[in-house]
Amino acid sequence: MENYSKARTVEQPCPCPFLGLSSDTTEVRVKDGSKIRNLMRYALSRMEVKPRALEGEGGRPKSEEGDSTTEVQEATCSQAPEKMPSRQIVFTGTGKGVSKAITCVEILKRRVKGLHQQTRLLFSPVLEVWEPLEPAAGLDSLTVNRNIPAIWVLLSRDPLDASLPGYQAPGNFDALWAQAAKEDAGVAGGQRHGGRRKRGGGGG
């Protein structure tokens, strides 16, 4: 392929693996160049709800200092105060976007408590078109079909089928991190107590 350069990559349509979703389920497609802040602003505007008791004068919710989603939430609440938050949201990412999709999922689970999770790992077909570096050389364009890793994550306020593979109950994420922190603390403590070097008494 030293005589070719990649002209473009076309992702083939990949149907959502979660069946029976309602028509108003939010879907967030995460790409390699996507900014997590923008993705989370949109996701939180669909999943978070601002109680009326927190609204200030004029019907706008009070701002929270340091909250990067305040602007989106204010616009959403002021334009459609009667709209209820989504019950479900789907994140999907392919290739290098997989890690960003996972990051978005974990951020949302920390912001919106009690979400059930269903994860699907699969491969998504892509079409690569390669063009010759020197058209005058008589080489033809090449089309390459590839399968790249993809992830689909469903987060739901309503319970999901716990018997299906890839299910994660609410709160498991916090429990895992708490256990990991405890183990790390134990290892660090052992190193502090057992890692002291003896003074003096050098070899003869």
Image (cartoon, rainbow, N blue to C red):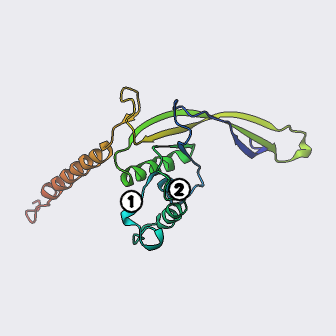
In the shown orientation, is residue 146 left or right of residue 72? right
Nearer to us: label 1 or label 2 = 1
- In the rendered image, the quadrant that contains the C terminus is bottom left
Residue 199: x and y in percent read 10, 65
- Residue under the image location 68 percent in, 36 percent down: 12
Residue 18: x and y in percent read 51, 32
Residue 124: x and y in percent read 60, 35
Q: Which amino acid lies under the numbered mark 1 shown in the image of this protein? A: Pro
* 3D distance between C-alphas at marks 1 and 2: 19 Å
Q: Residues within 10 Å of mark 2 (few under 14, many from 20)?
A: some
Q: Which amino acid lies under the numbered mark 2 shown in the image of this protein? A: Tyr
- Indicate the secondary structure of the residue bearing disc 1: loop
In the shown orientation, is residue 181 left or right of residue 192? right
In the shown orientation, is residue 55 left or right of residue 128? left
Q: Is residue 196 above or below residue 128?
A: below
Q: Is residue 126 above or below residue 77?
A: above
- Indicate the secondary structure of the residue bearing disc 2: helix
User: In the rendered image, which residue does mark 1 sit on?
Assistant: 51
Q: Is residue 69 above or below residue 143?
A: below
Instruction: Return the mark for residue 42.
Output: 2
Between 71 and 31, the one nearer to me in the picture: 71
- Residue under the image location 36 percent in, 30 percent down: 162
Q: Quadrant of residue 95?
A: top right
Between 29 and 75, the one nearer to me in the picture: 75
- In the rendered image, the quadrant that contains the N terminus is top right
- Residue under the image location 42 percent in, 56 percent down: 49
Of callouts 1 and 2, the N-terminal one: 2
Q: Quadrant of residue 185?
A: bottom left
Residue 38: x and y in percent read 54, 59
Q: Quadrant of residue 34?
A: bottom right
Q: Residues within 10 Å of mark 1 (few under 14, many from 20)?
A: few
- Residue at the far left: name it: 201
